[in-house]
Image: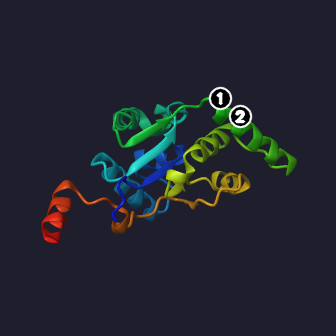
Amino acid sequence: MPRRRPPAFYWDTSVFILALEGQGNYPAEALVAAAQIVDLAEIRKVTIVTSQIVVTEVLPSRAGEDGVRRLRRWLQWQSLMVLAVDTPVVERAAQLRDKALRLQQKRWLGDLLHVATALTVASDLEAVHSMDADVCQLLKLAGCALPCHAPRPVSPQLLLPSAGEEAAEEAGDG
């Protein structure tokens, strides 16, 4: 039976910066994959999930005014889910920070909040995308088995068929 929801990927701020800059010291494969995922999100074939802190972290000085405008446009899409930094997220981030400090690992607050946010919807995610190894390490420290890596091309098998494709499939079943 086909999946009824588009695949979802959690993006931390580093991936938004990658997608918005479209250049820089990033692997070409990650740039291409991020662009593909943005294109698929625009047509609701995938869902991008993130924390509302991305709004404070994508700055005009880094992404440019055009990048900030594009981010604001993307944030209006139904396929881009922006999760609030609420009390459960903050409490989970504090627990994770405490655990890291006991291991003598200092962690940046933004990374902690992204990981805590991703954990709230982990069962709905295919993967966490980040260009920051610390985010992936924190995810493991939290005991989460989700894949965490730079954006990768989305497999066609993960995508929902379009309405026209579904109608053709149903007509072929009869």
Can you give x and y, in whole percent of width and height, for residue 102 in the image? 87, 47
Q: Are marks 2 and 1 in contact (CB under 8 Å)?
A: yes
Characterize the local packing of mark 1: few (<14), some (14-19) or many (20 or more) Cα atoms within 10 angstroms.
few
Measuring 76% from the left and 40% from the top, which residue is drawn there?
A: 95
The residue under label 1 is 87
Q: Which residue corresponds to mark 2?
A: 91
- Going by the picture, which residue comes out furthest to the front? 174
Q: Is residue 38 left or right of residue 96?
A: left
Please give left or right for residue 132 compared with residue 65 in the image: right
Rendering quarter of residue 1: bottom left
**Regarding mark 1 in the picture, which secondary structure is present there?**
helix
Q: Position of residue 26 (x, y in %)?
A: 50, 58
* Residue located at (69% from left, 57% from top): 140
- Taking depth in this image into account, of 109 and 63 the one nearest to the observer is 109
Q: Amino acid at mark 2?
A: Glu
Residue at left 44%, top 65%? 29
